[in-house]
Amino acid sequence: MSAPLTLIVAPAGAGKTVLLSQWIQSRPDLGVAWIDVEAADDDSVHFAQRIVARLEAVDPRLSDLEATLGEPGGGLGADMVEALGGALEDVGRQVVVILDDLHHLSNRSTVEDLWILADRLPANAHLIFSSRTDLRLSWSRHRLQHGLVELRRAELAFDQTDTAAVLMQITGRHVDEDTAATVLRHTEGWAAGVQLVALTLRLHSGSDAVVDALDATDRQIVDYLSQEVLDAQTPERRQALLALSVLDEMSPGLVHTLTDAPDAGGFLRDLEDESMFVLPVPGRRDWYRFHHLFRDLLRYRLRASDPGAEVRLLRRAAAWHLAADDSSAAVECLLRARLWSDALDLILQRGRREYELGHTATVTRWLSMVPQEVRVARPDVRVLYGIMSGMTGRAVEAEETFRQIISDPATDDGHRLVAAAYLSAIVPFRPHPETYLADALNAVRLLQELSDVVVPDILQLTSRELLMTMACVSAGRAHLYLGQLDEARGWLETALGTAGGRYPPFRIHCFGVLSVVEAWSGSLRAATQHADEALDIARETSLLAHSSTADAYLARAIVAIQRGEPEVGAISLHEGNLRAASNQRSQIMWIAHAASKLIDPLGTDVTAIEPTGSPPPIVRRALLAARHRAARQAGEPHEAIEPQRGWSMLAFEEIAALLAEANLPTARERLEQIPFRADSQKPASEVEHRILSGWLFALEGHSAPSRAELVSALEVAGPEWLVHPFIRAGRAVSQLIDALPGPPDRFRSLVVRLSQRVGRGGTDQLAEPLTSRELEVLAYLPTRLTNVEIAARCYVSVNTIKTHTAHIYRKLDVLRRSDAVARARELGLLTVSAETYTL
């Protein structure tokens, strides 16, 4: 318990689970959350929900972790990893989280998140990884930093004394040294092998024949001994064991259904008592499972003796699960039985429940298990496979599916409409938004032209109203990514007015994307209102962790940048990127990456890493403009900017570069050539244009028109508290504004102060600098807001705020909030203006 992590790696039957079970029984003082990892846990939401449920049983306060659950496909997510660390620290006892059979987890992102969690556990928590295979992680670093505890095959193997003790305990009689040595030689101390030998010895009056057989045979010891054990059972019990081998886990009800055993509970307990390789399932009373190895042997024997039995038994098990209202387990049984049609019928009937639980990766896995030719033959299934693939971040596969459906002459108009709308929704996942804009416009056109066509109802995700909303939002997104903000706004407002726009996840999408459009345009009050409305809906409907909130969070971050205090948006930036990354919506991640260049210049957030693929045009221009601006403000040489055809950040930078070089004739020519029209819905553009005009007039020696343009720029920017264009212009413009006649108002003073602010205070004086998110939380500490109120303002969990606060205290080397504020002021870290908290 003194180290954060114990690693147990050994083959099946080595005794890993038995060891852990005996250890926790010997430590009643510990709070234990035991998770038997299974294939379904590749769905990260499903896995996270299981972890939360186990932890909640340890301490009800840990149920708050439910709020950090993310979208499937992207691992547990940094948000939940941080929340886990913070929440476990608050539990007033030692807690152990056991992840048994971790080799079943093939979702690499989730494995890596668990590895990160091991680094961030508080002193009272301990993590145990138990696996048949090594997980290919950097164990050496953990050995050095944390004193990793490792138990491998050599540590678990029985020696001769152990072997003799086990043989005697199971057989009930004395075992001589020669017998123990022979068994040890053949089993190499493998616990399951020794147990099988003991069972065989118990069934024979003498041990010589068994020992001789072990010495003589070259056959697999498992095959030999399993036959000995099974053949010694009564026919009724042997048949029951074979029948139960089709199950992953078994309860008395299931046992009775498959075996007709009159006392199914007693039957299971007898198997456990007689060491017949049956183990209780942690956390599930009266549920058991076979040891994996023994179950495999039973199943092979069943298939050899009756090839059709497995299908019959799995069908009966599926019916039992359905009667118990466990459709997920029923689907698993039907798929294992290769009853494709029955499984697909059930998925289409009951899959909505799994979707609402966030288990879209599970539904995708189910559908992918069905042969492609079977899926293609059923239009509803074919479309659903594309929908689920898209939702879990498999955008290429989703796009291929939808385009094949649309181009297939056999596709009816109803399914073609669904495929067309969902194809347009690929736009946040893939580059080239112009392609998906065309798809969105085509979907809208088809929905209008084919107004009489009946649209199939697939998991209640394909109504005509929802499809129209989806196509409109997709068109708005595409225009945004292309930098066409007016067109984007129009489509998004249209989407909000549709009937489907009232569906909460879609409404969150609509308001979220619209808030990004407004933030980019400089309409910051509207952006804040739309973003908060999206997040309020998400909070009311328990969707704050849903991927639909990504845009709203990022809009809050962009608003903070536009107001000149980017650190205020650090948490929103992080939360938005997490949700976009959960299912790999790369175009949204590119917007987060562009924002990170201003919010997180130290690169402390994952958004500092460039997403894969190509950025959308609006981001490409913004990143290029930022690179040119940095060179201009540093007085460094830089490449000439290609003449721009329309107004944008890059057009602003093109003219600013000419002014910085005192190339006034060309600057005047370009300012007049680039099309520009003042628009109240795009104040950022007007402020930029007036700043450049005022700067140009000043350099030309025309003081009065220069002052007029700069005053007008301030008047347009003031109501929105729009500071960033002045910061981008640089010190030359800041000095002109500072020299304007008359006493400055609050906004003008803020513009001058923020335009001249350099660096990030004294964070570089710390041995471990504060991250951007910690700086944002730090800014709240001088206020009277509680952690709950801060979390509400940031739309994050209280655990997230508590975690950041704990990190702040540690880095500032303080114990209390008041001391943290005092120390931060000494270092010059509290630089956020009071206006930030009144807007």
Image (cartoon, rainbow, N blue to C red):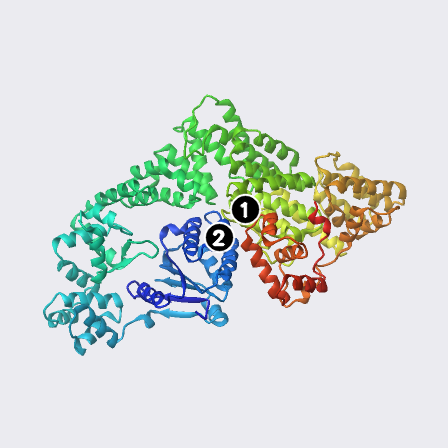
- Image coordinates of residue 440 in percent, x first then y, are 54, 32
Label 2 Cα crowd, 10 Å radius (few <14 / some 14-19 / many 20+): many
Q: Amino acid at mark 2?
A: Leu
Which residue of the protein is positioned furthest toward the top in this rendering? 452
Q: Is residue 287 visible?
A: yes
Answer whether labels 2 and 1 touch (C-beta < 8 Å). no
- Image coordinates of residue 235 in percent, x first then y, are 12, 53
Label 1 Cα crowd, 10 Å radius (few <14 / some 14-19 / many 20+): many
Q: Is residue 133 visible?
A: no
- Image coordinates of residue 721 in percent, x first then y, are 73, 44
Front residue (pair 778, 115)? 778
Q: Amino acid at mark 1?
A: Ser
Relative side of 121 to 242, left or right:
right
Q: Quadrant of residue 290?
A: bottom left
Q: How many marks?
A: 2
Front residue (pair 189, 59)? 59
Query: From the viewer's perspective, is residue 764 above or below residue 451?
Result: below
Front residue (pair 698, 530)? 530
Mark-to-mark CA distance, 2 and 1: 27 Å
- Image coordinates of residue 353 in percent, x first then y, are 40, 40
Residue shown at the point (54%, 51%) measured from the top left: 797
Relative side of 297 to 7, left or right:
left
Residue at image mark 2: 65
Relative side of 197 to 538, left or right:
left
Residue shown at the point (43%, 54%) measured from the top left: 56
Mark 2 or mark 1: name the one nearer the start of the chain. Answer: 2
Looking at the figure, which quarter contains the N terminus? Answer: bottom left
Residue shown at the point (29%, 37%) measured from the top left: 342
Front residue (pair 377, 279)? 279
Residue at image mark 1: 586
Q: Quadrant of residue 171?
A: bottom left
